[in-house]
Image: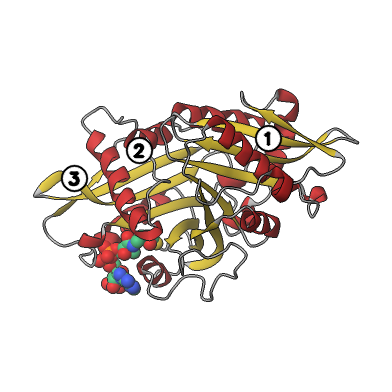
Amino acid sequence: MAPGYELVELPAGAGVDGPYGWIHEGLAAVSRTDVQRTYGDADLVESAAGYAALLADTSRYVHYRAVVASTEAPTTAVAHASVDLPTVDGADAAEFGLLVDAAHRGRGLGRRLYDWASSIALAAGRTSWVTWLDVPPQRPGQSPADPWPDPAIPDAHAGWGFARARGWQFEVLTRLFVLSLPTRPYAGPDQAGAPVPGYRLETWPDGIPPRWRGGYAALMGQPWEQATGGIDSNEGAWDEQRVLDEARSAADRGQTELWIGAIHEPDETLAGVANVGFPGPASAHAFLGATEPGPDHRGRGLTRWLMAAGLAELARLRPDLRRVYTWGIPDHPETVEAAAALGYVVAGASATLTRQVAPDVG
Ligand SMILES: CC(C)(COP(=O)(O)OP(=O)(O)OC[C@H]1O[C@@H](n2cnc3c(N)ncnc32)[C@H](O)[C@@H]1OP(=O)(O)O)[C@@H](O)C(=O)NCCC(=O)NCCS
């Protein structure tokens, strides 16, 4: 690392109000600048308090964070790295993050932080590594139905060049879609998401009722093998306790959430779910996450119905919203088709990269 910079680790348990609060601020600020540049807005970046709440939750991960600051401005982060070690599932896995502010690149900060993160993962015996790269939209206003250009990550992407040189490989692209309101209002349930015979929707504003929690966990566990490139990590491990933990964690960060379940009436089983939420009462954006029809219930229009119902709930709760985000992976064509029908456009993508390392290799 070039002279004039210093790496500072966030001590475990250090909160946003204490002497290390500047690190939490730095994690948020460096991310905000980069995400703004990549996606055109920074809606999806947590606040410093939001990051602190995520780090305080150690029910499923041990979290490590470090920042780099210049010695001239020792409490202003210009780069950060993260290592999250799953503790419930994924005993081999380590989830990495690395970001250097554009004005400070090419000075060895990335290499230094990567070495810090790698040594933590190796010391913990973690040999299946996973990370996610933000990829900008390849042209503005693209429909979710348009094919993603090949190569999925442009060769000029700095993080991809850095990662490839270190033995990482590309696994899968998760696309981010955004619906702008009210300039592109959703088509409404009648046109975009008609009810599917044999099913009913239930809305759960106060959390998932106990009788559906097991079914919800089963649905949430299904697609994540894709998003972690086949690496077994906490991302794919869902049980009833996690359903409660995730809702509590979101509430701790000030989020409002509600859930919609699609019930298959002939056997009264949970056939699909959707989750909508927004970060706070004044936020301009919301997200429509985790729209998951079960494997036996696909191809019937349930995804569209759930997504349209989610938008209708948001319109009722927060008519002032300006943007709604959702995500789609390639093996989930229903989400992509529904997003296109509802008027979403591509906002960017997240590329999953993995690396398998031998225990004694950095
Ligand atoms: C990738 C990133 C962290 C590199 O940070 P940096 O501080 O500029 O990197 P360094 O100066 O430490 O350079 C480290 C190495 O990466 C190489 N590198 C840096 N930018 C590169 C690029 N655009 N393409 C290819 N290689 C690159 C350097 O040549 C150097 O190689 P070496 O170790 O063989 O000498 C930074 O560009 C970034 O934050 N990008 C966006 C976020 C991201 O994609 N993060 C995920 C990374 S896995």
In contact (CB < 8 Å): disc 1 and disc 2 = no
Residue 242 seen in the current view: no
Depth check, mark 2 against mark 3: the one in front is 2
Q: Distance between the residues labelled 1 and 2?
A: 27 Å
Q: What amino acid type should be assigned to the residue bearing mark 3?
A: Thr
| 114, 273: nearer the viewer | 273
- Badge 1: residue crowd in 10 Å (few <14, some 14–19, many ≥20): many
Q: Residue 28 in the image: state x and y as whole percent.
A: 32, 43
Q: Residue 175 in the image: state x and y as whole percent.
A: 54, 59
**Residue drawn at point x = 82 percent, y = 35 percent:** 269
Colour approach in the figure: secondary structure
**Image mark for residue 260:** 1
**Residue drawn at point x = 37 percent, y = 38 percent:** 51
Name the quarter where the C terminus is drawn.
bottom left
Depth check, mark 3 against mark 1: the one in front is 1
Residue 341 seen in the current view: yes
Among the two numbered marks 3 and 1 on one chain, the one whose residue lies closer to the N terminus: 3
In this image, 79 relative to 3: left or right? Answer: right
Indicate which quadrant contains ligand 1.
Answer: bottom left
Question: Dot 2 corresponds to which residue?
Answer: 47
Q: Residue 259 in the image: state x and y as whole percent.
A: 64, 33
Q: State whether residue 289 is above or below residue 205.
A: below
**Image mark for residue 76:** 3
